[in-house]
Amino acid sequence: MKTLKYYFAKAKKEKWAIGQFNFSDWSQVRGILAAAQNLKSPVILGTSEGESKFVGLQEAVAMRNVLRKKTGLPIFLNLDHGKSFEYVKEAMDTGYDMVHFDGSKLPLEENIKISKKVVAYAKRKGIVVEGEVGRIGTDASKLYTEKFQIKEEDLTQVKDAELYVKKTGVDVLAVSVGTFHGMDVTGVSPNLRMDRLREIKNKIELPLVLHGGSGTPDQDIKEAIKLGICKININTETRLAFSNTLRKKLEIDKDEIVPYKYLPEAIEACRQVVEKYIKLFTNKG
Ligand code: G3H
Ligand code: ZN
């Protein structure tokens, strides 16, 4: 199987993006996997600190191993938004393919200091490191009743990003260019700041990462990919599809208590969201 670094280089060269889909439950993984299998696509399974603590780091790694073996697909595992060196190290020691150290809320110097440590440790194991500069707002999985508007000071500052990349040696960089974690109630969040993304791309060679992908209009995603975005993270939209479908199913079939009978529709709803996004990210639409 080709490495994740290979896929990042390929995506950058050919202008498409790898989808990262987060999960906290095996049923969600089944939905993500079905989409990747249908489209024969590489995929990154993501777990935040919270998600990985619920699933278990070892269990997540074991799951990835089995699925890789069974499907032959390039399936990778990323620790998403790791907040401390210690936890990121634990994920690396357990066998994650990639770690995202999120020091974006720290002063830049501190973010650089810890990121450097992560990179030094990851290099020995060939693990991909995602760094982050700029603040991506709000909470994943919430539905906002007002349109989100990013504050100018939360956008990635080009100079900060340049310094960070030069000093840390991260492999890929998450940028704050107007998307946010969660979705607004309309389901569409056209907030991407292409001007800032273009400025970043002109100065930084690395593959760039877009967080808060849920609800971003197709056209914005396509344009962002042209401007150097090589990985896009989706969480809220799959959570929403999965949970709402499950809720409806249980409301209708009030007496059903067998999980393998009431879960398939929620898995299918998750698959549909993931498939839609993989097609969009890889220009297969
Ligand atoms: O790191 C995960 C993501 O950035 C997901 O964001 O929940 O808005 O899709 P989202
Ligand atoms: Zn994120």
Image (spheres, grey):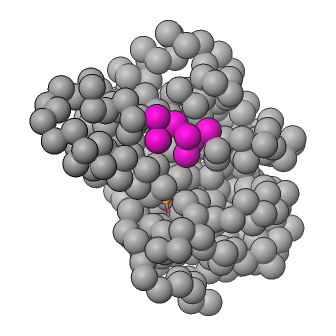
Q: Quadrant of the N terminus?
A: top right
Q: Can residue 271 be seen in this snapshot?
A: yes
**Left or right, 84 with reference to 177:** left
- Residue closest to the eye, 99 or 24: 24
**Left or right, 51 with reference to 144:** left
- Residue closest to the eye, 33 or 48: 33
**Left or right, 68 with reference to 18:** left
Tell me if residue 64 comes above or below residue 117 in the rendering: above
The dominant secondary structure in magenta is helix
| Start-end of magenta stretch | 268-275
Where residue 157 appears, as percent x and y from the top left, is 67, 80
Q: Residue drawn at (60%, 23%), measured in percent from left and top?
A: 37
Choose top left, top right, bottom left or bottom right for residue 110. Answer: bottom left
Q: Residue drawn at (48%, 55%), measured in percent from left and top?
A: 237
Q: Does the magenta run of residues contain 267?
A: no
Tell me if residue 29 comes above or below residue 203 in the rendering: above
Q: Can residue 160 be seen in this snapshot?
A: no
Q: Residue drawn at (35%, 53%), measured in percent from left and top?
A: 244
Where residue 74 appears, as percent x and y from the top left, is 61, 23
Choose top left, top right, bottom left or bottom right for residue 54. Answer: top left
Q: Quadrant of the C terminus?
A: top right
Where residue 125 appears, as percent x and y from the top left, is 51, 29
Q: Does the magenta run of residues contain 269?
A: yes
Where residue 280 appears, as percent x and y from the top left, is 73, 47
Tell me if residue 229 comes above or below residue 245 in the rendering: below
Q: Residue drawn at (39%, 35%), measured in percent from left and top?
A: 265
